[in-house]
Amino acid sequence: MDLFAWERHHWLSGRALPVSLLGRPGRGILRILFLPASFAVLAWAYAPARSAAACDTNGAEVAAEAGADCARAWFDANLRINEIQAVGTAESYKLRPSAAMQSLIRMGSSDDAKALDFAQAPLPEQLKMGARSLEFDIAYDPKGGLYKIPAGASMAGELVSDDYIAGMSTPGFKVIHILDIDFNSSCVTLVACLQTVAAWSRANKDHLPVAITLKSNDDRTPMPGATRPAKFDAAVFDALDAEIRSVFHPDELITPDMVQGSHATLREAVLAHDWPKLGAARGKLLFVLDDTPQKTALYRGKRQSLEGRAMFITTDDKSPAAAFITVENPAKQAAAITANVKAGFMVHTYADAETKEARSGNTQRRDRAIASGAQIISTDFLVADPRIGKYIARLPDNRIAQCDVQASPQRCQGRDVESGAGLAPEGSP
């Protein structure tokens, strides 16, 4: 077995743990030392007083049987990343439009004005509150300056800030919800957004893996003076991979190649449930291109799966590159979500959309998203917006993550998977 295959085998099985030898802050690793499983379990456990031998991580069928203070060690040794559920944010970068922009939007459609009238907290706050997935809509700007003066701002008489213009003047990918209209972002460049996430991740190296979904934004907004966006093609997607890798080191990412391993295709690995275990995945991130079939085909190119790529893609369940599937509305497609989850795929869905659930207080869509087993559940309301209502989308008991109610029911017994803490109510996942 060559070195790469040996490392991957131990990485997926959770029987070894990478440890920094050179003291770089956070979880970045320049050289890797693999320790025996007993020490790995001890390193990940929250309770240092417990020896690894005291935790029955191999024989116990559920976390409660592993021993006192051993829940997290059991999770790391036994659960794979497709066997847990977590909530994250949609439009993770978005800020509320100004009053002037809201008036302009309202002239076109009052429904659109309502749909855009919300904001997300700064990225570190979202992550601290438990968001374990983030989303960014990205526009390409190879020379810089293409999006620095939004047409809507000019029409509404809004002066954009000097910081906004400076950020938009740099070459690279920009983070924008709707070109020329809903353009205010907490981080205007993708690099700035990813650097913020990387800083938080390196300071909180025991976090569960964070999924970051990206979507291309190259549709011209139908309005006078609208920006003509740069179109995405294969070369642009190559640049996107390079920008991701300019921020994150290889050991900080879970990539398609790592999951595929020796399987003939990525789909084959997924159907074999050969996702990494939690102990090997903590402190890492994975990227998903959640886009149209035309765009994901450009990104995939002529590859059998996604060889050499930084991101997974969302696709249908028959593709050799299939690993992630997006189902927009769990209230209408819960059965399809559950079937894909049980087959081994990771499913992304939405607890709410366009502020409708938040304004009505209707939790049906959120509740069905959780019950369906979708592993990645996105919301615009990780916390309630007092200007809109009391609606929030969180897991029961505000857990950051729980055992998937379809893929691994009853194994966590009500405990939070990230920390191992919590009680075990009757019937809890």
Image (tube, rainbow, N blue to C red):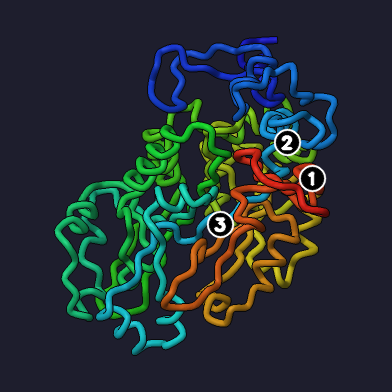
> Residue 256, percent across and down?
61, 35
Between residues 325 and 276, which one lies in front from this camera angle?
276
Residue 421: x %, y % from top left? 64, 41
Q: Is residue 208 left or right of residue 304?
A: left
Q: Which residue is mark 1?
A: 408
**Distance between mark 3 and mark 1 Cα atoms:** 34 Å
In what element is the residue under mark 3? Answer: helix
Label 1 amino acid? Ser
Residue at (22, 80) in percent of width and height: 156
Which comes before the other along the chain, label 2 or label 1? 2
Q: Nearer the viewer, mark 3 or mark 1?
A: 1
Q: How dense is the environment of label 1, judged by Cα within 10 Å: few (below 14), some, or many (20 and up)?
A: some
Tell me residue 34's x, y (percent): 60, 13
- Residue that mark 2 sits on: 79
Secondary structure found at label 1: loop
Q: Residue at x 49, y 52 (%)?
A: 129
Question: In the visual, does 81 lie left or right of 191?
Answer: right
Q: Which residue is mark 3?
A: 294
Q: Amino acid at mark 2?
A: Leu
Element carrying mark 2: loop
First-in-chain label (3 vs 2) = 2
